[in-house]
Amino acid sequence: MSAYDFVIVGAGIIGAAVANELSRKRPSAKILLLEKANKPASQQTGRNSGVIHAGVYYPPGSYKATFCRQGLEETLAFCQQYQLPFEQCGKLLVATDKAELQAMQTLYERCEQNELHPSMLTAEQIRKAEPNIHAVGGFLVRQTGITDYQKVTDCLLSIAMESGNLDVKFQHTVNQLSELGDKIEVTAATPAGNKTFQAGFLINCAGIYSDALIQRQGLDCDFRMLPFRGEYYRLVEKYDKVSSHLIYPIPDPAMPFLGVHLTKMIGGYTTVGPNAILATGKEVYEGVFSAQSQLLDIFGKTDVWKLLWKYRKSAVKELRSSLSKDYYARLVSRYCPGITAADFLPYRAGIRAQAVDRQGNLIHDFKFVSSKLTLHVGNAPSPAATSAMPIAREVLSRLF
Ligand SMILES: Cc1cc2nc3c(=O)[nH]c(=O)nc-3n(C[C@H](O)[C@H](O)[C@H](O)COP(=O)(O)OP(=O)(O)OC[C@H]3O[C@@H](n4cnc5c(N)ncnc54)[C@H](O)[C@@H]3O)c2cc1C
């Protein structure tokens, strides 16, 4: 049985950032990273919007607000240092009718509290800045940017591997954890059968499966991860340069999802999305029934029904956007007139890992669960790609 000082589970951006931080801070430690897929960033990290968030929405003092602000600076600096693609294009939040102006004002004040110094724009100023965008008002957050998080993750891992103390194993699905005195025993399913490793400490960065590992360890887990699929479309070529900023609607403040937005992508094209549909399995990227469906697991507990009832209006709207391309296009055409379903090309979906408590409440902030020899990153939804480096530092600060 191989022995390590640290085992990290999951090679998404959080696992990669933790591996990188750990290999620098503990150069003599032996570190193992176990990943169930055959490459890094195959789940949320490689399927997101690619936005380097500035921290518009989050309550001051929350992990999200603090780590997002730090993460913005650090992600930009990291991209610059390692010559990864990025652009600090700014984000325009737009109100499409008078009813949205009050919510827009509240969000603007939140931005000011988060020291982002947003600029309020009139309808006329918006038309000048973005001729294809129609709005009754809006505000600009200049700091927001875009990058390719797959590349950021690959880079974090390759730097960590250069240190010589990190061992990365793909196609290793961790399915058992047990604390035995001052060691933790970790078993992973591999194409060659089960393998067991021993470590001094385990860090769980398994994204949507983080709850499963907490439970496998026998710890009390008062939440579970539910899969919210975000469906996107790519706009046809004539819309590649439809806006020079990212264009976001004013979201429902009760929801952690930001509304279908226009996103400039690294690569020079534009996407619209994502909506937010409760998926029938943690890896069901399209449709309802597939080999990956986990209908009983997802819908067999009362928390999910409480959640669906609480957010029934949003749930119906989101479902409509999934069932009807025309309806989806209408959401976009509210602020970008002229776009129709005929302008949509297929694009890969992503699945958000979102923690929900037993009463069916969405847990908004990042969440950590620990035991003597384990630290679980329990809830790391958006903007966790932006915040990955500060999250990694937080993990280490809880270890040492
Ligand atoms: C549609 C969408 C849009 C988003 N947009 C943005 C955005 O624009 N900006 C932003 O900052 N954030 C965004 N996010 C959020 C961001 O992508 C995630 O918060 C972030 O990627 C989480 O990283 P992670 O490493 O925790 O999870 P993941 O990327 O999901 O990685 C977890 C890894 O663990 C592995 N794993 C799971 N179980 C096991 C096991 N038992 N054994 C071994 N390995 C295991 C998985 O295969 C996976 O590789 C978005 C997310 C989605 C889904």
Image (cartoon, grey):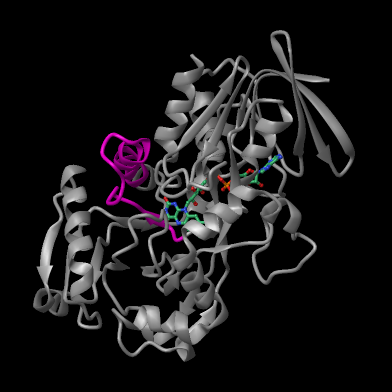
Quarter of the image where one finds residue 348? bottom right
State whether residue 159 is above or below residue 43: above
State whether residue 229 is above or below residue 385: below
The reply to whether residue 25 is in sight is: no
Q: Is residue 175 left or right of residue 105?
A: right
The reply to whether residue 88 is in sight is: yes
Q: Is residue 286 left or right of residue 389?
A: right
| The one of 126 and 129 positioned closer to us in this rendering | 126
Which residue appears at 65% of the width and 43% of the height? Answer: 209
Tell me where residue 132 appears, x and y as whole percent: 25, 83
Q: Is residue 300 left or right of residue 358?
A: right
Which residue appears at 28% of the width and 57% of the height? Answer: 88
Which residue appears at 64% of the width and 64% of the height? Answer: 285
Q: Which residues are magenta?
A: 49-77
State whether residue 236 is above or below residue 89: below
Q: Is residue 279 left or right of residue 86?
A: right
State whether residue 46 is above or below residue 192: below
Which residue appears at 38% of the width and 60% of the height? Answer: 258
Tell me where residue 266 appears, x and y as whole percent: 42, 64
Quarter of the image where one finds residue 124? bottom left
Tell me where residue 116 appears, x and y as whole percent: 18, 48
| Quarter of the image where the N terminus is located | top right
Residue 69 covered by magenta stretch: yes
Residue 334 covered by magenta stretch: no
Quarter of the image where one finds residue 195? top right
| The one of 162 and 236 positioned closer to us in this rendering | 236
Tell me where residue 364 appears, x and y as whole percent: 42, 44
